[in-house]
Image (cartoon, rainbow, N blue to C red):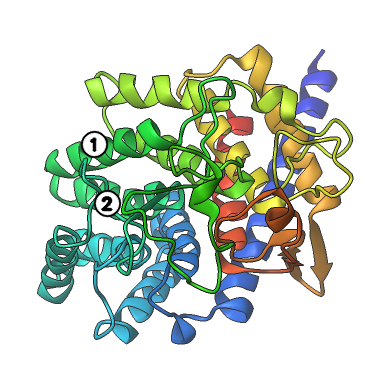
Amino acid sequence: MRKIITILCLFLFIGNTYAQTRIDSLDVYGREVFMPSAQYKWDWGQATMLNSMVHLYNSKPEAEKKVYLDYIRTSMDLTLKDANGMHPNAVASGHGMAFLAKITGDPRYVEMANKIYADYLTTPRTRAGGVSHRTETVEMWDDTIYMISMFFLEMYRYTGDEKYLKEFQKQYFLHKEKLEDKKWGLWVHGYDDDNDDYKDRCCQFGWAQMTPQRTSIEFWGRGNGWVVMALADALNTVPEKSLYFRVFATELKEITKNLPKLQDKKTGLWFQLPIYPNDPANFIESSCSAMFAYGITIGLEKKVLKQKTFLPVVEKAYAGLQKHATKTDRKYLIPTQVCEGTCIGDKAYYFGRKTREGVNYAIGSYIMFYLEYEKLKIK
């Protein structure tokens, strides 16, 4: 019996060491190769990887925190003049300022965090009060939920002021009202509030004409991944006995309810458009797979999702990302099968998007999922 226990402990140690090695490889690739802090730009993809640096800082022992604090500080110092909260994709990077305000107390970061919130309050809104994803036209996108959540949740962690939770919850439900599909629990990508078919050279022109409600018609994988991550981060932030926790827990259950049956049996990943697994034009998309797996893992940790149903889902996703959506280049682990930046269109539009390797938001999503997976396995 003693030998069996020793062997099991050895396997557990090897498994955890292997997971940590993968995190370290992704981390070094992101920080040193793909997006060194000296190259940080004030935008949403960069903000997602920056958030993984915050997660790494929070997960490391005191002696290992400095490298992440330095990365975040340099990124924010170099973009101090660009920092603003004039639209959700700009608000996203603001979480770095809020984090530094909390950790350092430096008045520069405190002032900037407050300025970003003040900017946010002036951004265009729908008639119902939903914040517009763009300044040039009034549209709600599911992407917005994650972009503003990073900032609002960090501001709550910094100040303890529930006004940030209230605003996040308000925006979540205003977006859900327009974007959620009751059958699938998933959200369509966007809603047009001002009846203005804006030419942005990214969206398919006229996408809002696809339904009488002026919403788009497809459930984009990464768009839903953003929402799942935001809900998971909220559960990891608010007190478990609070009303907020119960609300966000209910929402995570709803949006993930069909993900187990939509998970590809062969790869353990999810598709660019998740509800068409058998369409030959569809393809496995890694960033949404990491995002879904991240949110589900936190749902398991918080005992919000049923272990019997969802633990195998997480295990398959972890193995699938390793086998089907990463490559090794020297000492680096690099995400593959990452859909490039995507706006709104029809089915053919999403199927026609190119995939890339690396990519800041994929690196960030992988790191955050692997960190939570490692915690789950240790338990």
Viewer-closest of 6 and 379: 379
Residue type indicated by callout 1:
Lys
The label number, if any, that marks residue 276 in the structure image:
none
Residue 58 percent location from the top left of the image: 40, 52
Q: Does any portion of residue 9 appear in the rendered image?
A: no
Mark 2, Cα crowd under 10 Å, few <14 / some 14-19 / many 20+, is: many
Q: Residue at (44%, 80%) from the top-left corner?
A: 40
Residue 165, by quadrant, is: top left
Secondary structure state at the residue bearing disc 1? helix
Residue identified by numbered label 1: 170
Circle nearer the N terminus (1, 2): 2
Residue identified by numbered label 2: 131
Residue 118 percent location from the top left of the image: 12, 63
Mark 1, Cα crowd under 10 Å, few <14 / some 14-19 / many 20+, is: some
Q: Residue at (53%, 36%) from the top-left corner?
A: 295
Viewer-closest of 310 and 90: 90
Residue 35, by quadrant, is: bottom right
Residue 74 percent location from the top left of the image: 36, 81
Give the Cα distance between marks 1 and 2.
Answer: 10 Å
Q: Residue at (43%, 59%) from the top-left corner?
A: 51
The N terminus appears in which quarter of the rendering? top right
Secondary structure state at the residue bearing disc 2? loop
Viewer-closest of 158 and 63: 158
Vertical order, 368 against 205 (above or below):
above
